[in-house]
Image: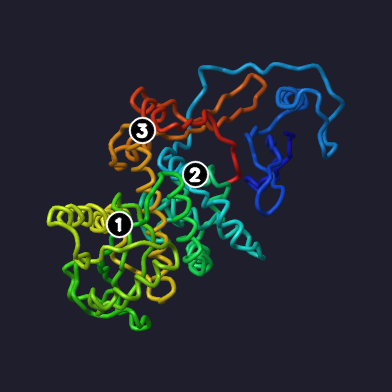
Amino acid sequence: MYLRRCYRAKDGKRHAYWALVKSVRTVRGPRQQVVAYLGEMDEAGRVGIRQAAQGNRPDPQGQFLEPAPIRWVEVDPQRVRVENGRAFGGAWLGLQILRRLGLTEFLERRIEPGREDVPWPMMAWVLVLSRLCEPSSELHIAEDFYEHSAIADLLGVPAAKVNDDRLYRTLDAILPHKPSLEKHLKGRLGDLFDLEYDLLLYDVTSTCFEGAANANPLARRGYSRDHRGDCKQVCIGLVVTPEGIPIGYEVFAGNRTDVTTLEEIVTTMESLSEGCYLLRSNVKDWTGEELWRAYMQLAEGAEGAFRIQKSDLGLRPIWHQKPQRVKAHILVCFLTYVIWKTLGQMCREAGLGDEPRKVLEEIGRIPVVDVVMPTSAGIEIRKRCVQRPTAHQAILLERLGLHLPEWLEMIEM
């Protein structure tokens, strides 16, 4: 770590400030992260901070004097304060699951870096984590939600880099990778939870549009499961395991009937895995009890998935008008639902039931705050700290095998 001088214009004058900075590796190469903003400092203060951070390590840019004895900085406890509290736990939990699923590395390998200022995989996780924590439009993410969450700290993407145009273009960038994402998830989820794919459940739902959607050939009026016959819609066919783990999906025109989607979805699923498929009641050699049990699995699996995606994850209504962005919006909802169900499986294996909603809500209450410590040297030391979990939260984290960080690196917002 080393000190960097920053300049800001205030009251028509140019003022010099100092920040404690470290170098980090990112997908776009080495970058600098701000550990703490230190304000104005004299030479003694700079030496003390530098020595506390690095010992006798020289500054790589040659900005420092020769190493000096370590100096201690006194903190005024009467003026210590907390600032900039933001939601942390939910996004952090979602990111841990993304990493467990291998999705962060997978998408980085699939999408070659180009001239974009922020890598598309990073922006994709902005969309997914935002939908997990507070389902909303891309415009709301850019203008309000993102700067009040800790996703910037987790992903290293400053709020100034997140705007609605960049989020829309991220949808365009990730949609071509839908088939490979589904194939990756099928294998990864199978390994994590020892899933069997000899029986898959399939159901169809619809979701409506806000607006005319005249440019979208899939937007049609048909039988509405949302009871919105006044709106155009698309149909979504979802395939899940008996445990409700999503394997894949397809988007159909809003006026397609369920039975006409059958052959198309079977062909799609055969490209991911082999096995037999329970589609309505086409299995004729089962007993009545077996058929009833499978029907109940369908109700709890595919139909339950639709309920969660429409209520908790904000699948409906669709505000996008361009056909490809409608499909990409559904892909983001699908990936978010995969996180949801993965958390459910983790809860089941940890003896916490299989309902992730309460766990996500409880962990989501953990905030991150900036602790500001004024010193006798006239500088302020900032530390971005994660609030210590309550006893109940600590038990949940321990059962899930997750370790909450105590503090975060500070980045320039």
Q: In which quarter of the view is residue 269 placed?
A: bottom left
Nearer mark to the viewer, of 1 and 2: 2
CB-based contact (under 8 Å), mark 2 and mark 3: no
User: Could you tell me which residue is drawn at 76 percent across and 17 percent down?
Assistant: 70
Q: Is residue 367 left or right of residue 280?
A: right
Instruction: State the residue position of label 3.
Output: 350
Q: Circle 1 — which element?
A: helix
Q: In which quarter of the view is residue 214 placed?
A: bottom left
Q: How far apart, in angstroms, are the residues tagged by discs 2 and 3?
A: 16 Å
Residue 165 placement (x, y as % from top left): 50, 66
Mark 3 crowdedness (10 Å alpha carbons): few <14, some 14-19, many ≥20:
some
CB-based contact (under 8 Å), mark 3 and mark 1: no
Q: Earlier in the sequence, mark 1 or mark 2?
A: 2
Please identify the residue farthest to the right as the structure is shown: 66
Nearer mark to the viewer, of 3 and 1: 3
Query: What amino acid is at disc 3?
Result: Ala
Nearer to me, 351 or 74: 351
Residue 105 placement (x, y as % from top left): 58, 51
Q: In which quarter of the view is residue 396 placed?
A: top left
Looking at the rendered structure, which numbered label has been put on residue 100?
2
Mark 1 crowdedness (10 Å alpha carbons): few <14, some 14-19, many ≥20:
some
Instruction: State the residue position of label 1.
Output: 309
Residue 137 placement (x, y as % from top left): 38, 61
Nearer to me, 181 or 368: 181
Query: What amino acid is at disc 1?
Result: Gln
User: Could you tell me which residue is drawn at 23 percent across and 75 percent down?
Assistant: 259
Q: Earlier in the sequence, mark 2 or mark 3?
A: 2
Q: Is residue 160 left or right of residue 15?
A: left
